[in-house]
Amino acid sequence: MDIYILDSLLRRDTLVDKYLSFIWTERMQAYGDFELILPSTVSNRRLFATGTLLACSESLYVMTVTTLEDNTDANGVATLKVSGVSLEQMLQDRVAAAALTDLTTTPNWTITNTPGEIARKIFHDICVTGTLNANDVIPYIHEGTLLPASTIPESTDIITVDLAPMTVYDAIQQICQTYQLGFRILRNSDLSQLYFDVYSGSDRTTLQTTLPAVVFAPELESLQNTTELKSIANYKNAAYVFSLAGYETVYPDDVDPDTAGFERHV
């Protein structure tokens, strides 16, 4: 997997192919993060200044360097740990609120539409048109998707949200988590374009034939470094429900009410 440092126009500028370890994590309903460990040299410290933008050969996401940590182990080996977050984190630096002219009557922003369209409108008004402040506009941003359309349909329910001023990130994340949607900002190759996308995902189960199914199973060698866990640490098989009139003991359907002694967990 190759790592690229991007220039100010989001074009690949420097190839980084020598490193000790690399973790690149993407998330559906939150910003992703990465961790890169490489030898601590003058050139590496110069390359990976905070604020540096990174791309990866296997991904359309862009990461921002936020933290640098120089370490020397017991054997005197010096390493540089570089970590950061994906561009969706930028939405925490923008406020989701109605236009300033509306704040004289109410501080809340009321929007009625489908959940996906509400999330898109919040992003569009703040980060594309700059309703609150032109400086909130994200550079090189486009709306739409670079990837094939989702095959899982979005909710078509018409809802109304009444947003108190909060970050764009929190507003969009709350809607997406409630209605099983994802959001992402993706880079379009070296064309100096970023695409914001709210999506519902695609069905990759064996119950459909539109897309190749994805099955994780040891016998298919599609799982690696697995751990099997068995625990009763948080297991309960009885519960007391209290009220002013007394209490009732309830049990799961598969538990004998006469279970007692060491086997009773309330």
Image (cartoon, helix red, strand yellow):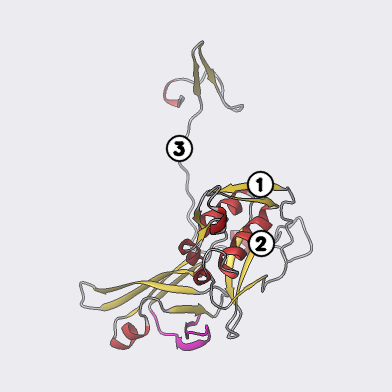
Select label 1 or label 2 by which is in front.
1
Look at label 2 and name its amino acid.
Tyr
Q: How many labels does the image show?
A: 3
- Residue situated in front as seen by the camera: 197 or 160: 160
On whether residue 261 falls in the magenta region, the answer is no
Where residue 108 appears, as percent x and y from the top left, is: 55, 49
Q: Mark 3 or mark 2, which has the lower sequence index?
A: 2
* Residue hosting label 1: 160
Q: Quadrant of the C terminus?
A: top left
Q: Measured along the vertical axis of the image, is residue 141 above or below residue 12?
A: above
Residue at disc 1, secondary structure: strand
**Residue range highlighted in magenta:** 1-19
On whether residue 7 falls in the magenta region, the answer is yes
Q: Measured along the vertical axis of the image, is residue 169 above or below residue 157?
A: below
Q: Measured along the vertical axis of the image, is residue 66 above or below residue 164?
A: below
* Residue hosting label 2: 199
